[in-house]
Image: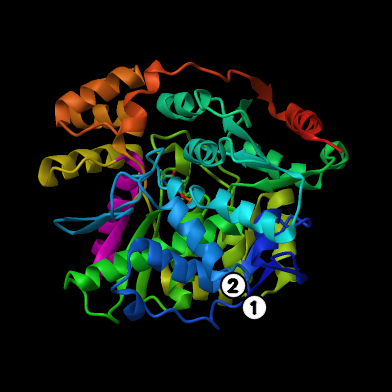
Amino acid sequence: MVRYVSTRNRNLSLPAHEAVISGLAPDGGLFTPDAVDRIHIDPADLLKCTYQQQAAAIIGALFDDYSEEQIRNCTEGAYDSKFASEDIVPLRPFRDGWLMELWHGPTSAFKDVALTILPRLLSTAYQMDGRDDTIAILTATSGDTGKAALSGFADVPDTAITVFYPEVGVSEIQRLQMQTSPGNNVEVIAVKGNFDDCQRMVKEAVSSPLVRDACRHVTISSANSINIGRLVPQIVYYYHAYTELVNSGAVRCGDRINFSVPTGNFGDILAGWLAACLGLPVGRLICASNRNNVLTDFIRTGTYDVNRDFHTTMSPSMDILISSNLERLLFMLSSQDDTLIRDLMEKLKTEGTYTVPEEIHAKIGEMFSAYWTNEDECAETIRTVYERDGILIDPHTAVALHAMYSYQEESGDTRPCVVLSTASAYKFSRDVYRSLSGSNEPDDLKAMQKLQELTGEAVPENLAHLHELPVRFTKSIAVSDGLETIARRMKELSHD
Ligand SMILES: *Cc1c(COP(=O)(O)O)cnc(C)c1O
């Protein structure tokens, strides 16, 4: 049976379903699978499978305390007509590679791939344990997770969800998507701070006595990528891209391919690394960042240093300085050295910086390359790809595409490369419209209209009707009021 081990205490390990319920470990660690090199998943066995079947095989192998039927119910319930593409994550060829479009789900962002299934994995876990308390989902968002989580959890029995987003930073469309969310169990709160403040608040809530004392028959969990129930479903699309390329004759089964991944919290790219550990022939994982290039520096030097300015960019889902999931990579690469991880994370908290031992840095370099893209390069990439290939991409995807070109130029590596396309361009209409037309339209909704007129590409259904929905949530709090706000909410949800 696969155990999920806390990165800060290797003696604390849980079976998958309990790790899914728990989200974060009580010691602040992240649950990490202990068996990825014991399990082998050969892409050759998945060539004839649908996306749903691949998902059942891969998630089932890692979440092996769920029954086959339970996993199948989860994958089939999640990956259905909620996705506008029958392929779930279609692969789109362009001149220099492939874009894997991960944004055809209900909220037009790649987070849907994991957040359509997480509520199902969670409720199933609850049934397994016969529990009757309310699951309170606390979620910090830099823009896309919030809406995807709200959509995934809306009116799911025995759950309630509260989303915290930075008041300045998310796009107007992202904000409206959240503020207009339906459901009787949802709450959305703006925070006068940035994403890192929101994420810290949610992490601290788990171990805060104030919050804990407020919970009666309430269990706090998380929909952030610190929850292993989000990470594992993301492994699937790396396999899916690979089998598509083999089936189309572009790649021979067994040959390695590269992936370029726009990275914020290091969840998406870590799923790619887990895929490689399970046996997917991966050459390079290109870690793409925007101006908040803390990961670029880390991967190149081995020193993680958040003592730098924070920038708001047109790829807000990557405006992050503390990439939580990196902790999982370091834990696995250090053969579960929990003492080292505790020490590094303590340094990060007190000094804002740490340096990993050289052998770990060297191991990172065997698989990861890192590049960052500035705002002008991002805009130019959006324009070039549209003019040259007729493809409309969002700023996050542009950052990844630009990183792919930088990597290929520097390394000369011409292996097939899949670029992860993580959001619909319409979620960032203002910036994409400006990048394409050179003119400014400050109103995001008007920009969406103009972008459609300019390109003729259909606006995804969920965004097209956004302006007609009533705004339900306008509350805004200071960072310092976070724990008290959460405690109050937990009291409301408490019962005997
Ligand atoms: C969340 C997000 C990312 C970054 O993914 P991580 O798992 O946080 O690294 C990139 N692009 C978009 C559009 C996102 O929503």
The residue beneath circle 1 is 1
Residue drawn at x 63%, y 19% is 475
Q: Residues within 10 Å of mark 1 (few under 14, many from 20)?
A: few
Q: Is 408 contained in the magenta span?
A: yes
Residues rendered magenta in the picture: 394-420
- Ligand 1 within 8 Å of disc 1? The answer is no
The spot of residue 205 in percent (x, y) is 76, 42
- The residue indicated by pointer 2 is 64
- 373 relative position to 366: left or right: left
Q: Position of residue 140 (x, y in %)?
A: 60, 39
**Does residue 369 appear anywhere in the picture?**
no
Kind of residue indicated by mark 1: Met
The extreme left residue here reads 388
Q: Is most of the magenta stretch helix, strand or loop? A: helix
Apparent side of residue 85 relative to residue 218 in the rendered image (left or right): left
Label pair 1/2, CB-CB below 8 angstroms: yes
Q: Position of residue 74 (x, y in %)?
A: 51, 57
